[in-house]
Amino acid sequence: MDVRDAAGRWDALGSRDSSSRQAAMELIHQEVMKRIETMGPIPDPQSSSPPAMDDSLSSDLNALLAHVLMLSKQCPYEDVREKCICLLQKVQDVGVRIPRLVGNGPSRFIPEKEILQVSKLNERIQSIFEDAFAVLGRLDNISLVMGFHPQYLESFLKTLHYLLQMDGPLSLHCRHYIGIMAAARHQCTYLVNLHVNDFLHVGGDPKWLNGLEEAPQKLRALGELNKILAHRPWLLTKEHIEHLLKAEEHSWSLAELIHVVVLLTLYHSLASFTFGCGINPDINTDGGHTFRVPSLSGYCVCDIANGNSTLEEMFGNQQVSEFSGEVEVLMEKMKQLQECHDEEEASQEEMATRFEREKTESMLVVTSEDEECVPSRDVSRHFEDLSYGYKNFSRRGEHVPTLRVLDYSWEDHGFSLVNRLYPDFGQLLDEKFQIAYNLTYNTMATHQGVDTSMLRRAIWNYIHCMFGIRYDDYDYGEINQLLDRSFKVYIKTMVRTPEKITKRMYDSFWRQFQHSEKVHVNLLLMEARMQAELLYALRAITRYMT
């Protein structure tokens, strides 16, 4: 029995009934100890170097132990965490090497102490995490970081559950495979690995994971749609849609295609969030744990990389002091812009000119991390045309056409189309967009009672401007007033080439703001990007239908 089988038998760990959890832990305990017995004689536990386990039997045991380690740290139920800690100790006591954590917490960018821990939760977060654990059998690092914003996390998890697990046009394994294809487009190994495991768990054919060429033709045909949506969604036409809907025995239905489009756009944007928050591998996956013996020294080089050293904290404090007053300057600009609104409004012609100027300038923003990223074979095998990307056309100065929201918008057009072809899902998406856009605690850094609507709108509209989407009633001159160059560099990199995001770039914008506020920014970027891609895809489908 491998870890996927074990995970299936461990579903009861997600039960709110403590007796069911206790019975499940007994089964896990028996299974682990049985595995150890089949390994043969246990070496002397006092040995300084117990033999490494590398055969097939020990490989299965290692996977189970890694799963137990994850449960000991991230299960929302204290009784399960305690029993998993005891089990790991017992395994170690009989001389078997147990796994230990790699890295420090869910994020490379955010100190672990600032991320909501499952053992110190308020009642609402506890309930959300329990629901997620019951459905997914895990609390992944993305959810833990999103835990800064419970209202959004609840909506996100509800949407994900409906999209991946509820009845819908696509089979379960196809949903995960499409998620793999979308995440691979941005070289997001975190999401690829997550959905490789889920794909196998729901009965997906392992051969498909050897490369896109091993998948059925119907799925391979999505390659063009995947790359255009990820990098140049404004180029999508009704002909692309027709090609997928009229491919004889490999044709997609309209309902299936809506499901596909939502999956692709969700995972392109979720890749942005993953890179933008520096999400670490989950504990039970490769890179999240190790069986190597820890060094004798208490110092570890990875402490600095994960923001846990005294030097890092001292340097960070120095940077914050150098940028003191940043928040107050931004608040003053917001106040001045509001006063200008009250006095006069620019003409429609002037607002159109300002939009075109901002759209052009957004393409000229050069990221400081402009080196080429070469995807590894493990990721690139899941998509075609490796050279296709944002960088190619931005260097040629290709024109991005303007899509006026007056002509095609989510509220007036996209929402109803999704709801018609994928019942009730349009409502879930709309709720997620609205929560991300309207989410506020009326704070900016240490300041309370602040109306942040102007700043949130500037961020959202700047991202849509990069995609050529124009709001006729918005003055794009506000963007240059509210978003400085370092922030624009971060936004463009996160939305366009998220695989190039670094901790230095994350640290370089809004230096006085809290990590929770930066995570909020990343939620805005993720949802604005998803809606932009979705608009172009739905417009192409609408044009095909009419």
Image (tube, helix red, strand yellow):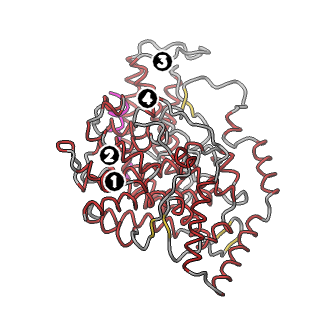
Q: Mark 3 to mark 4: distance in Å? A: 11 Å
Screen quadrant of the N terminus: top left
**Residue 240 screen position, x and y as percent:** 32, 51
**Which residue is at a point 39% across and 49% down the rendered structure image?**
264
Question: Which region is colored magenta?
Answer: 1-19
Vertical comparison of 350 with 93: above or below: below
Overall secondary structure of the magenta section: helix
Q: Nearer the viewer, mark 4 or mark 1?
A: 1
Indicate the secondary structure of the residue bearing disc 1.
helix
Circle 2 packing at 10 Å, graded few (<14), some (14-19), many (20+), is many
Pointer 3 residue: 53
434 or 534, which lies in front? 534
In this figure, which residue is indicated by the disc labeled 2?
Answer: 175
Q: Is residue 15 magenta?
A: yes
Mark 2 vs mark 1: which is more N-terminal?
1
Closer to the camera, 125 or 456?
456
- Distance of label 2 from label 1 (alpha carbons): 8 Å
Label count reads 4
Residues at badges 2 and 1 in contact (C-beta under 8 Å)? yes
Q: Amino acid at mark 1?
A: Leu
Q: Which secondary structure lies at badge 3?
A: loop
Residue at image mark 4? 63
Q: How far is mark 2 from mark 4, CA to CA?
A: 25 Å
